[in-house]
Image: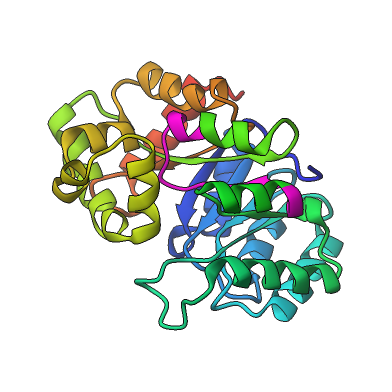
Amino acid sequence: MSVDLGRYGIWLGGALLTPELAKEIEDLGYGAIWIGGSPPADLGLAESLLDATERIAVATGIVNIWQAPAKETAESYHRIEARHPGRFLLGIGIGHPEAVKEYRSPFDTILSYLDELDEAGVPVAGRALAALGPKVLRVAGERTAGAAPYLTTPVHTREAREILGEGPLLAPEHKVVLSTDVDYARGVGRPKVRKPYLALTNYRRNLLRTGFTEEELDTAANRVIDELVLHGDVATVVAGLDAHLAAGADHIGAQILTASGRIDDEFHTGLRTLAEGLRLS
């Protein structure tokens, strides 16, 4: 693994990220910024965040294979790597059949995309793969720096580490609401988990595999929300994040959720509070 992500990072939708926010995240001591969504192949946002900061790593979570041609993505990778060596991790993924009309032969498409990145000189250590199931996790460990799973629990992290073995990167995302008001936390977390994620085949299959039931997923039951959206005081949230590390993760990307879904005072307070709880500085 050539990119140092640190132990804790912040995962945030690309539309909400700005160079100024990236600097704030860096100054608070986080190790990485994950650009959520499907950033285009030009990777312009990643470059602007790196330009605005000095040490923090930036990763895509994820570049969608169907939407970003491998050749153009590789050209962007090399441009960024030349400008900011060792600070950019190219996270790629296959997306979901419900969201991509062209979705077909996903496993073979992943392999073909990786072949194209190989031909374009993108190093294995500079890329990661969004992986949930065993087959794709094995590919992540063999042909990339490792796996960056989304919407998982420490149960999945433990199983993923067993499949990956020692060495490959394992960097899951986990949502958090920094509030001791259970009803409020569930009220913030439930809509952000329920739509679209609990209706997407790839996530549902993985959550069923890790112990949830069809009924729990259909109703977005409290157990589902409580396990997928950590909440409570900062010590409780930190313990939940650290459970991934204890299960074998190398890094955890925290996605701070707020009622507004915007970068407001609640978000900035949460960012600072979590950094203090994680003892980043």
Q: Is residue 215 above or below residue 103?
A: above
Q: Return the x and y of residue 223 as percentages of the image width and height.
A: 22, 32
Q: Is residue 257 in view from this perspective? A: yes
| 161 and 254: which is toward the camera | 161
Which residues are the magenta region?
142-157
At 53% from the left and 73% from the top, the residue drawn is 105
At 34% from the left and 71% from the top, the residue drawn is 98
At 38% from the left and 35% from the top, the residue drawn is 269
At 51% from the left and 49% from the top, the residue drawn is 133
| 139 and 49: which is toward the camera | 139
> Which corner quadrant of the image does residue 268 belong to?
top left
Q: Is residue 56 left or right of residue 247?
A: right
> Which corner quadrant of the image does residue 1 belong to?
top right
Q: Is residue 149 left or right of residue 192?
A: right
Q: Return the x and y of residue 135 as percentages of the image width and height.
A: 58, 52
Q: Return the x and y of residue 231 as percentages of the image width and height.
A: 30, 29
Q: How many marks?
A: 0
Quarter of the C terminus within the rendering: top right
Q: Is residue 188 left or right of residue 140?
A: left
